[in-house]
Image: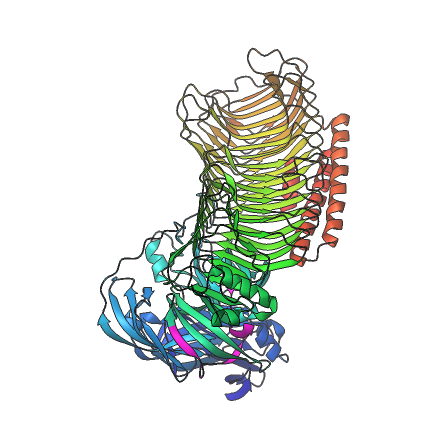
Amino acid sequence: MFVVLVLGFLHLISMQSAHAALMADLEGPTNNQPVSGIGIIRGWAFSDSAGVRISQATLRIDGKDITAIPCCSVRADVQSAFPQFPAENTRNSGFGITFNYGNLTAGAHTIAVTIQDSSGARFERAHTVTVVKAGDFSYIDRLNLDGASAERQGQDVVIAGLRVRDKASQQEKRVNARLRWFQNTQALGLVEASSSTAAAQAATPENKLGTKAEKVQPTSAAASLQYAALESPNHGDTGSGIAVVRGWAVAPAGRAIQRVQLFVDGEPSMTIPCCSYRSDVAAALPGESNAANSGFGVTFNYGNLRAGVHSMTVEIEDSSGALRKFVRGILVRNPGDFSFLEQLDLGAAQVRITGGQLVIEGALARDKATGQTAQRNLRFQWNNPAQAFALSEESVKDATVADLSCNVDGDTSSLENLKNNPGSSGISLVELITAINRAGAGSGRVFIGFEREGSITCSNDFPEINAPISINGDINGDGIPDIDIQGGNRDRTFKVRSSDVTIQQFSFQGVSAFFRAVGIYDHDGLGISNVAVLNNKMTNVYRGFSVDLYDRLTLSNLLISNNFISNEDDNDNVIEIETSLHNQDHYKNLVVANNRIENGDIAIDLDKNDAIIHDVSIIDNIVGGNIRMGTFLSSARSTVEIVVIGNQVNSPNGWCMFLAGSSDNSQSNNTLLAEFLDNTISCGLNISGEGNNELIQAVVKGNRFLNGEVISYNSSGGNNTIITDILSNQFISNSVSSSISVPISLNGGSGGNNNKVIVKIHDNDLSDSLPVGKNFTGVSINGGVGASSNNIITGEITYNRINTLNNSQDYKTGLSVIGGYGFSTKDYIAKNNTADMLANNNEFRNLKDGVKVFGGYSKNNSSTDNKVFSELHSNLVENSRTNGINIIGGDRDQGSSSTVVGNEIQAKVTNNVTDGIVCKDNIPGNTAKCVLSGNTDTSGGAKSAQAGYSTGMSHSAQQQLAAHMEQIGIKEQQLRERAATISDPRLQKRLLDLSDRLYEMQHKMSARMAGVPLSALSDQMER
């Protein structure tokens, strides 16, 4: 064994032979370091021999084995430091585990890590640490600085009289604490704590904002990864220094967590080690066999990110391929905006407690890489997930509002002059914004606080914000706004025209019918980035936040989080992000997260051409209204990419989530990409192609719909393509108000022509507890509806479960497939539409009819020359009141005399277990041709089986399919051309992947024309 110096540290090298060595280091905690709160025990290890892997990493405390340490995550710095060794080994060398030092007794302990590789080489490193526990508590759920004082002693900060509360016992103590900055954590750490007195019990303040608490809810029963949580960071957190990204994920029995991946701003960052021991998760989920070993965590240096708004995504995948995704919008702050500090010198700093925060003025940050220095004012507040003081704000200058009027009687020529000559009433917010604007963006961020609580009412608009500003209306740090901004006669309060602006902890009270609280407005074609609107309460507002009326705006890194927003009148767009008065806007990395919205909508609207909006995340909001996304008005050639995760949406309207193309038929060629994941929706999701040549891709996965539906259609436009994947959702129907429930309704065209819809409906649960008199159709597939022609819908319906509360009166159907549905005004005709569908391995229980397939059907208008190509394989249809499987050439509503003629079905029905099979032409002039084989009839004999034969596609059907193939080919080429113009590599790849899917669809259609069954193509695609 010998020692080398690399990466600035000494490392032990374990030699097993002249050809094998295990190299490793325990980076944190360092030897003799005081430790507290939740940290990570971390380092790196690798063998110098190709093919030799780390086989085990073990944590030992005070000589006892504690748990295995996850290994081996990506360490690019280690790979760079050791270029002479196998890159596969050095790159995948990181180990680490989150650990709550509060679970140890206060005082000295030995932390040891033992590493072993597959060749038998072994390494052990032990460090002595001193555990510091404020109040001697294991986990502090509340820290209060009211009544505390702070002073600097050398390089330490000493806080006297702070109050801490134990989570387990709710006991409070008043303690004194000594803090010191540590290079290896890039943060303040607790080095000494002593209890002074027991504190009186204090109730937790009411959360007046009404924002949703961070709770972990299981996803729908159909989803595969029901139990998981990202514990840190939280929505709207400030990231600084080296911190822990951590959480837990429980794989179902028989599976294992395969991958936990961190993405930053949509780009892959690192693999997160998993799965460490979590006794708390095991206790909370006693029925889950994998709950105990479910923890994941990794250290992350926020200094590597530029200051401002960022999105952090954690993807969790298990061995079955099931995926869970968490997204957080955060605000990054680092002293001096340096990546890694060699020193944070407090020798000349002033410290104080104000606004419920620890404030250090005049700290000198020195960058390790360049040696540059910067003097900054720093604000720290307690962070529960980290159990430590975390940096919440960094500024060049600070200023305080003393006058809550809107007076301007001070010297606003500069901030310094205003502080020296504030006028008779003190400094007002209007004066501060005016003075800071005069300095411009180059002067650095200014923090604005308030001297006392109260209300501000101005008759005129506030000055525009034209410089970096952070404004905080919480004066005591309790998380409740202390500054009320009354509407007065203003339409707008804060008008943002600068980058690097944060507005938080205000209460806005609207008076004007068009009152807007915060908006990005009236810009002149320049770029704006890093705007955050956090923890505000906005009542009776027309717009809580809006982006509007711009000229070619480039907007990036926007965070709207933890706000309460209500509208008193109707469902206005209380959060509205729309494109400008002109064309070519580019918006990216926009996060709308963890807001509570009452009687209002979230809207992402495009109404101009050639816009690009991508990396938009709508996450974990509670919405009493709608979420509207797309090119609703008249946009052309625009691209939208949005992910919608974990929201609770409840609207009195039938639909409350919209993804829609342009409603102006003269406009065309937009591309809309959206994912809807793990939402709880008490209403419907509407996916519609409104214009011409729209391309829409929607993934709907893991959601819970209560009396809601997913509906997809192409209306008045034409030549649109919609790709919809509906996967692992739960649909529950129990409404007493609507006459019929259709949880999944997908249509090739609904008043439109020449449209294409490609669907995959897989692993969904559909059930009802509807009262008598309510009808139900679980999945409805229509080639065309109403005045529609030459549309096609094609795809797969697999492994779904449809189970209803049967009764003797109501019409309940599991699956309905119709080539052309004559529905609407009598003058309209559904003509020459096609449904080409595979349904296999589904369960249909307790229905009037399990499966109904019609070539054409008329409710009150004509259905002519439509076609259905259907394959029904290995489905279970039981307890049907009439027939399990019904295949009908043409039919109409009872009493209707509408024309139903020329419709055709070709069906292959094999290996189903069903309550009878019916195959018949029914209305003369329509045709049903069926191939029946291997079916089990549980009804005691087929009730009316007419076995026909399949002749393959007719010439007219082949011509129609060839035309659709040609149109898809044009769209595929247009998509590649559009991708070539996109500068963002991740969005470019997303478009190219979609182009590949269109190419595969062309191949599939070509094979269908040649007579290849859909089932064979499905197997081929999976291979």
Position above or below: 359 against 989: below
Q: Residue at x 50, y 62 (%)?
A: 431
Frontmost residue, 16 versus 629:
629
**Percent from the top left, x then y, of residue 698?**
59, 43
Frontmost residue, 800 versus 931:
800
| Residue 843 seen by the camera | yes
| Residue 318 seen by the camera | no
Q: Does residue 447 show up magenta in the picture?
A: no
What is the count of numbered marks? Answer: 0
Left or right of residue 582, residue 540 in this image: left
**Percent from the top left, x then y, of residue 508?**
44, 50
**Percent from the top left, x then y, of residue 442?**
61, 69
Position above or below: 944 against 268: above
Snapshot quadrant of residue 920? top right
Position above or below: 617 against 370: above
Numbered range of the magenta stretch: 331-352
**Percent from the top left, x then y, of residue 190?**
37, 76
Frontmost residue, 323 versus 646:
646
Position above or below: 677 against 9: above
